[in-house]
Amino acid sequence: MAQQKKTKPTAKMTVPEQVNTDWSTKWWLVPVIIGVLIFATGLMNAMTGIDDHTATTDNPVVKDFSFGALFTNFNLGMYAPITWLGYAISHAMAGAQGKNPTPYHLMSLAVHAFNIYMVYRLVLKLNFQEKIAVGVALLFAIHPLQVESVSWIAGFSTPLFSMFYLMACLRYIEYTDAEGNRKLQFYALSTLFFVLACLSKSAAVTLPVALVIIDQWRKPNIDRTRQWLGYAPFFLIAVGFGLLTVYSRKHSGMNVGLDSGIEGIVERALVVGFTPVFYWIKTLFPYKLNIYYAFNEVNGSLPWPYYAACVSLVGTAFAAWYWRKKAPYLALGLLFFMANISVMLPFRPLGTFELIADHYNYLAIIGVALVLVSLWNAIQERYPAAAPIVRGVGYVWVGMLVLMTLKQIRIWKNTETVITNAIDNGYYQHGMMHFGRGLGYGDQGKTQEALQDFTKAIELDSTMKDAYKFRGSLYAQARRLPEAQKDLEKFVALDDTDVVVWHNLAMLYMNTNQTQKSLNAFNKTIALKPEAAVTYSKRAKLYEMMGDTARQQADLRKAKELAGSKKGGF
């Protein structure tokens, strides 16, 4: 009898028709507990000078909280009232002036922990095995790329919008599976969570694309017309919040369409193609992570890795199509990743310097993790003899990720550590890194170090007006008045609308007997802010020095009249 020909097993992943999705299983606790323990090491990290105060203690909506102001303001070019509500709760828990950073970190950690669980549930809902769901949730929980989103107080909007985003995905899947009245209930909840996600951060507008991808994976043969009618409200909401984001950026004075030195269609295309490959490499080898990355040209053009990245991107897309039946998770993971970073790709930046940023990966990393974990599992199934080695390599890699995450959390200890890390890795952002560290040194009373950094920032960008402002203030505190005067005059030459600088400059002139210059500066201050009682009071002192008693008395009366007003100061 002829022997039956043996067939070689394929790498296709076998997915059970039904998976255990009830609450009795406790495997989700593993990634949640590990993630919480790791990120709890950063609960005592300080507020950084990189937007943390601007987003919280200096945000009028947060420090003087009212529901009326919550929905009628912008901050840092964003419209994010739900994020500000989270900050306001932390601010109330943070004691006097809301400057204790721990409540903010606790809030972010709690949201991240819940997100880990929801990632686990989402992967199960996509009909993957539980071990795949646990693995994906674990990578989401502990990857070093997540540190910027979780440990950066100003980055809280990313975990928060992701929480509502994932809730919207889960409710949408339940909507597609439900019947009768519960179908409408789940759809309404999904829509509500999507709106809350957009009110937390506009990056949530990618959700409708993710829903299309999820439906194509789970229910490829259902009625497409009815399906697109279901998508329509989500896309309309996304367009609305997208337009609101453009408006909020312009309202805040940010340069929509900022090119950051990238010129021409070809160069822009190379940068866009390079960006996702850069993220994939950082996911596999999270080495030298920074608050800022630059697109570096060599001799006026982008170097060869940009071209190679575009070739790799096309090759990866072809591989996902070619193995769409044997390894369908490859296409699913890559599409989910691309959907979530699509609005972050540097087609047309909306006034920010971060054309590439770690926190853009917070949700997108789910797609890459799904590919890695599924592939790792499939290789073990296809090559059982090599399974122990493959499994061991995976465990070692995850162990290295944990160590690198712990290190990265320490890098986010304070302003000095996070910016020094970027500078040491060669990223200066045209002097902004030195400027940011100078602010941190100034807050710590390290005057000489702050002066050095502000000077370096000005050397790298002679138009950086705020570097002149803060260096001039430090010179004035050190009684180096000629240098202070020079810097403050340079600032007002670049920006003549800052009432505080004009007032300080007027005081400096008065203290150095430059009477006419002092009077001109006081007059400019009052022109910018007529209700500033302190300026009238100080100008009265100048008139006394000039022997002009009538104007002195008039200014004193005006100062007294304005003293009781809430607008009497700066």
Image: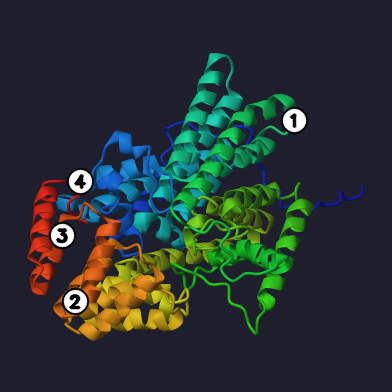
Residue 115: image quadrant is: top left
Residue 403's x, y, as percent? 40, 67
**Which residue lies under the disc numbered 4?**
93
Is residue 39 visible from the viewing direction of this image?
Answer: no
**Residue ID at (42%, 78%):** 423
The residue to which callout 2 is attached is 515
Quadrant (top left, top right, bottom left, bottom right) of the C terminus: bottom left
Cβ atoms at labels 3 and 4 below 8 Å apart: no
**Cα–Cα span, label 3 and label 1:** 75 Å
Q: Label 1, label 2: how many angstroms apart (C-alpha)?
A: 82 Å
Which mark is nearer the camera, 3 or 1?
Answer: 3
Q: Earlier in the sequence, mark 3 or mark 4?
A: 4
Identity, as a three-letter code, of the amino acid under mark 4: Met
Residue 109 visible in the displayed image: yes
Residue 511, horizontal then vertical, whole percent: 14, 78
Q: Distance between the residues labelled 2 and 3?
A: 15 Å
Single out the mark in the foreground, 3 or 4. 3
Q: In this view, does 476 lie above or below 100?
A: below
Amino acid type, callout 1: Asn
Residue topped by disc 1: 221
- Amino acid on which disc 3 is placed: Tyr
Q: What element carries label 2?
A: helix
Which residue is under mark 3?
536
Q: Is residue 146 found left or right of 531 in the rendered image?
A: right
* Dot 2 or dot 4, earlier in sequence: 4
The secondary element bearing badge 3 is classed as helix
Q: In the rendered structure, which disc, 1 or 4, sits on the residue that comes first in sequence?
A: 4
Q: Is residue 128 above or below residue 280?
A: above
Reply above or below: 382 against 509: above
